[in-house]
Amino acid sequence: MDAQDLSAAVAAIRNADSVVAMTGAGVSTASGIPDFRSEDGLWNRYDPDDFHISRFRADPAGFWRDRVEMVRELFGGDIEPNAAHEALADLEAAGDLDTLVTQNVDGLHQAAGSEDPIEIHGSGKRTVCTDCDSHFGIDPVMERVEDGETPPTCGNCGGVLKPDVILFGESLPEDALLRAQAASRNADVFLAIGSSLTVEPAASLPRHAIDRGGSLVVINLDRTELSDRATYDFRADVTELLPALVEHVVESG
């Protein structure tokens, strides 16, 4: 970690009128949630086609049975926020983070205390009715599936319920995407944390900030698609560097 770059990034955040942070899968791996593309990632353990909307539409009962099995295998223990989630909640509470955007669907930002993260890929904590758009918590629905109700149906209209996450072949939620884009275009500092910045349209969000003169701060173990355009590019564990960065920002306030 370059101490001079860290100090400069701290100063940029403190002097900014608008700070946006976007988190990817690398933020939640320390909590025990696998990423997608690493050796132990989801796509080396499961067929990505099983996460396509066409699979759900063709066989919602089988989709839900597989979903329960996957959740049991991957998330059997308690999943808790880690130091990176807590650091972002602290940055928000200190008034130094205006908008938090996440590609993750695990709900760990809210569990850490972040008030209103923009979940551009949806939320694994909810289900949505495919007919009337009603929303229900995931836990009681999963229990119904475990008890043999496949697929689970809506208590309001009888329509089939779907996890409220964006599957392959689906568009991102328009309202969430528009909010994220507007915040990014207004950002003086954009923090890209734990993301390879390869998945569109999320990868375009930091470009909006850069194109309008904002500073890009990247924190990721590996090089990203925008590392060459980053003002500060930290190749580091997000659970170590981000808390240090936030601590310096809060202490200097």
Image (cartoon, grey):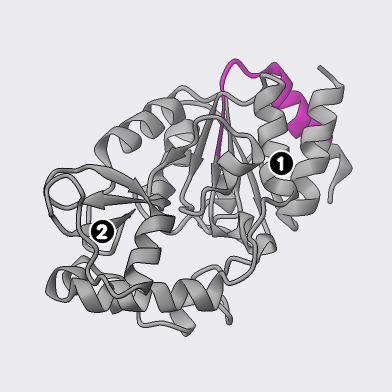
Q: Nearer the viewer, residue 111 or 17?
A: 111
Q: Nearer the viewer, residue 222 or 99?
A: 99
Report whether 236 appears left or right of 60.
Answer: right
Answer left or right for 249 relative to 93: right
Q: Residues within 10 Å of mark 1 (few under 14, many from 20)?
A: many
Residue 101 sits above or below residue 69 on the image: above
Residue furthest front as drawn: 147
Q: Nearer the viewer, mark 1 or mark 2?
A: 2
Is label 2 in a helix, a strand or a loop?
Answer: strand
Q: Is residue 9 magenta?
A: yes
The question of residue 90 being in magenta is answered with no
Number of residues whose C-alpha sits closer than 10 Å to that of mark 2, classed few (under 14), some (14–19) or many (20 or more): many
Q: Which residue is mark 2?
A: 162
Residue 67: give x, y in percent of width and height. Answer: 37, 72
Q: Name the residue located 31 percent from the left edge and 71 percent from the top edge.
A: 51
Q: Is residue 5 at least partly visible in the picture?
A: no
* Residue indicated by mark 1: 86
Which portion, as a residue range, is magenta?
A: 7-21
Q: Position of residue 143 (x, y in %)?
A: 40, 65
Q: Position of residue 2 (x, y in %)?
A: 84, 47
- Seen in the picture, residue 202 relative to 153 is either above or below; the reply is above
Q: On the image, which quarter does residue 248 sit in? A: top right
Residue 244 drawn at (x, y percent): 83, 41
Quadrant holding the C terminus: top right
Q: Marks 1 and 2: CB-CB under 8 Å?
A: no
What predominant SS class does the magenta segment belong to? helix
* Picture layout, residue 53 above or below residue 1: below
Q: Amino acid at mark 2?
A: Lys
Q: Amino acid at mark 1?
A: Glu
Q: Nearer the viewer, residue 124 or 46?
A: 124
